[in-house]
Every structure is written in structure tokens, then in C-alpha cells.
Amino acid sequence: MTDLEKCMESLIVIFHRYADEDGDGKTLSKKELKKLVENELPTFLKTQKNPKTVDLILKDLDQNKDQKVDFEEFLPLVCGLSLACEKCYRLHEKKGKK
């Protein structure tokens, strides 16, 4: 498997690890999403000033308003954070070349 394929597999496995906690396996409840963010994105969570961050994330991601997040709804969180991290990466690269 290539590095990118491994990353994609990890993303899928991590999502389902948390989605399986309530036996559903297909979606993240608010509790499961909170646990995923706390355990898998602790640095992101620490930088947030709002104690209702997970509530806001759920509201933003939950396109069909069922109070759960499926894998397709989860991906924009990962993409958005990846884009922000890539911007930081480019800034550090630019500073290193000066």
C-alpha cells in the first residue's frame, strides 16, 4: 500500500472505531464525535476558545440534521483541518528559506 492509501485506510478505520462504540458502526453520535475529537485531534481542541466546539462541529457537519455524522459528513472536518495545516506548513517552509 502507498502512503496515501495507508492514510485513507487510517481515516476510515479511525472513523469506524468511534462509530462502533454505540453499536451503530455507520455514524458518530455527539458523544462519539466528542471522544474522537478529544483523542485524535487534541491539539486542535486545545486551541479552541469555545467550550461548545464539539456542538458547533456537529451542527456544521450534520447536513441531514439527524444529530449524527456519517463518514461523508465527517470528511469536510478532516479536509478543512488539513487545509489549515497545509497553510501553516507553507508558512514554515517560507520562513525556513529566508
Image (cartoon, rainbow, N blue to C red):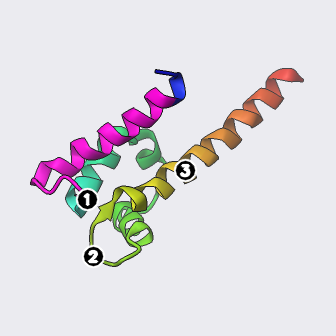
Q: Which residue is mark 2?
A: 66
Corner quadrant of residue 16: top left
Q: Which residues are magenta?
A: 5-27
| Mark identifier at residue 79 | 3
Which secondary structure, mark 3? Answer: helix
Outermost residue to the bottom: 65
Please provide percent x and percent y for residue 9. 39, 34
Amino acid type of disc 2? Asp
Asked if marks 3 and 2 touch (Cβ < 8 Å), the reply is no
Amino acid type of disc 1? Thr
Q: Residue at x 62, y 47 (%)?
A: 84
Q: Residue at x 23, y 56 (%)?
A: 26
Q: From the viewer's perspective, is 25 left or right of 41?
A: left
Please provide percent x and percent y for residue 66. 27, 76
Please provide percent x and percent y for residue 33. 29, 55
What separation in Å lies between label 3 and label 1 (alpha carbons)? 18 Å
User: Which of disc 2 and disc 1 is earlier in sequence?
Assistant: 1
Q: Residue at x 16, y 48 (%)?
A: 20
User: Is 13 in the magenta?
Assistant: yes
Asked if marks 1 and 2 touch (Cβ < 8 Å), the reply is yes
User: Is 18 in the magenta?
Assistant: yes
What separation in Å lies between label 3 and label 2 (alpha carbons)? 22 Å
Q: Residue at x 14, y 48 (%)?
A: 21
Q: Quadrant where the C terminus lies?
A: top right
| Mark identifier at residue 27 | 1
User: Which of disc 2 and disc 3 is earlier in sequence?
Assistant: 2
Which secondary structure, mark 2? Answer: loop
What separation in Å lies between label 1 and label 2 (alpha carbons)? 10 Å
Please provide percent x and percent y for residue 78. 48, 49
Q: Main secondary structure of the magenta part?
A: helix
Outermost residue to the left: 23
Outermost residue to the right: 98
